[in-house]
């Protein structure tokens, strides 16, 4: 990616058990079996990640894979056992506590699965609460809170209490609260998993709408691969505390790095991840039925390409770079690609 790195971790470990720190100093690269034999749990094992400004970086894996622990290490909500973590080039692990608190309050936003709204505060007051903690004057914090409440689609409900809201509306308040501090880096830990499927889809749409407007750097945790491929620019797949592969959704499906990633992605519909540029052929002399973007997923263009008697041009930056026809689309839909 061309954008600068905003958050990076290098060789991060989080071990639980007696004398975990001293064990790593004696054994800097233990295997999972080594840890078990010494009574240790490797919640995060030798994780290295670079997250670029403006991207949606999804960390996913099954329950117990270490994804939430890694994010808590990245934000230093928990202390890693070993490794380095840099935010905007500054080492979070050697940073004085007061500087870390300032960064968390002004540059990081967090949304968790549990909404954790304060029941005695209204929607507006809940959204304004982080600004109250920062000492922002009342008039200013309420004005900023009012803007983010409107941004997440809750205008008119500013004076409601959490008990008067649906689950999806409560999660919107949680999102508004995290956005009120105008964070540069936004952590979301399975924020929609407690919602029913219809509301979850609605919240994913809302999330993408907000990202298209705000262009935040986002670290998003999920165990749902369909959710991950819908939202992510890149995905890190974790297993047993270790990162198996970091790649785009398309690369994970087409070029899995390990047997685990291959099995993890085996049942994913390829039409949801394969893009037009990956299956296009060189431009011919034919007439064309129309144009499609190079990064359009096959799922998005399948109906019109299949219905057309002529191929479509594949466009990047206003210029044709290839063509895609009915046969290529059908190959993807039936799993031949």
Image: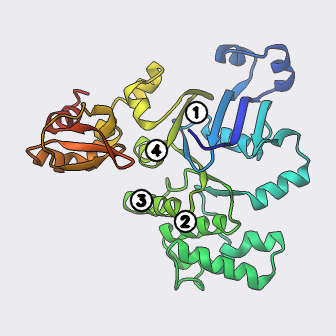
* Residue positioned 51% across, 38% down in the render: 235
* Residue positioned 74% across, 23% down in the render: 40
* Residue positioned 54% across, 83% down in the render: 157
Q: Of the residues under marks 2 and 3, which one precedes in the sequence?
A: 2
Q: Is residue 66 visible?
A: yes
Extreme-left residue of the structure: 309
Residue 31: mark: none
In x, y percent, where is residue 214? 57, 62
In x, y percent, where is residue 171? 55, 65
Q: Of the residues under marks 1 and 3, which one precedes in the sequence?
A: 1
In x, y percent, where is residue 291? 24, 49
Query: What quarter of the picture does the N terminus occupy?
Result: top right
Q: Of the residues under marks 4 and 3, which one precedes in the sequence?
A: 3
To which quarter of the image does residue 114 belong?
Answer: bottom right
To which quarter of the image does residue 14 belong?
Answer: top right
In this rendering, is residue 183 above or below 150? above
Give the spatial CA distance, label 1 vs label 2. Answer: 25 Å
* Callout 1: SS: loop
Residue that carries the numbered disc 2 in the rendered image: 171
Tag 2 near tag 4, CB within 8 Å = no
Give the spatial CA distance, label 4 vs label 1. Answer: 16 Å
| Between marks 2 and 3 in the image, the one whose residue lies nearer the viewer | 2
């Amino acid at each position: 990616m061309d954008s600068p790195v905003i958050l990076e971790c290098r060789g991060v470990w989080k071990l639980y058990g007696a004398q975990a720190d001293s064990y790593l100093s004696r054994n800097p690269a233990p295997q999972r079996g080594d840890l078990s034999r010494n009574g240790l749990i490797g919640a995060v094992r030798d994780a290295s990640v670079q997250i670029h400004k403006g991207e949606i970086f999804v960390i996913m894996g099954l329950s117990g894979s270490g994804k939430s622990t890694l994010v808590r290490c990245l934000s230093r909500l928990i202390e890693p056992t070993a490794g380095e973590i840099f935010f905007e080039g500054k080492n979070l692990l050697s940073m004085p506590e007061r500087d870390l608190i300032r960064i968390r309050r002004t540059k990081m936003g967090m949304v968790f699965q549990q909404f954790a709204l304060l029941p005695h505060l209204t929607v507006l007051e809940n959204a304004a609460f982080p600004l109250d903690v920062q000492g922002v004057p009342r008039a200013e914090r309420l004005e900023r809170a009012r803007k983010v409440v409107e941004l997440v689609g809750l205008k008119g409900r500013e004076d409601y209490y959490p008990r008067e809201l649906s689950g999806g509306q409560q999660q919107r308040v949680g999102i508004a609260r995290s956005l009120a501090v105008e964070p540069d880096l936004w952590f979301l830990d399975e924020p929609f998993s407690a919602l029913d499927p219809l509301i979850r889809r609605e919240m994913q749409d809302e999330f993408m709408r907000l990202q298209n407007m705000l262009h935040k750097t986002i670290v998003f945790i999920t165990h749902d691969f369909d959710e991950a491929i819908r939202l992510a620019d890149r995905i890190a797949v974790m297993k047993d505390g270790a990162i198996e592969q970091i790649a785009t959704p398309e690369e994970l499906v087409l070029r899995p790095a390990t047997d685990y990633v291959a099995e993890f992605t085996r049942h994913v519909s390829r039409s949801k991840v394969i893009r037009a540029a990956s299956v296009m052929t060189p431009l011919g002399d034919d007439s064309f039925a129309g144009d499609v973007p190079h990064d359009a997923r096959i799922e998005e263009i399948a109906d019109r390409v299949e219905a057309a008697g002529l191929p479509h041009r594949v466009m990047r930056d206003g210029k044709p770079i290839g063509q895609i026809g009915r046969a290529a689309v059908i190959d993807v839909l039936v799993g031949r690609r």
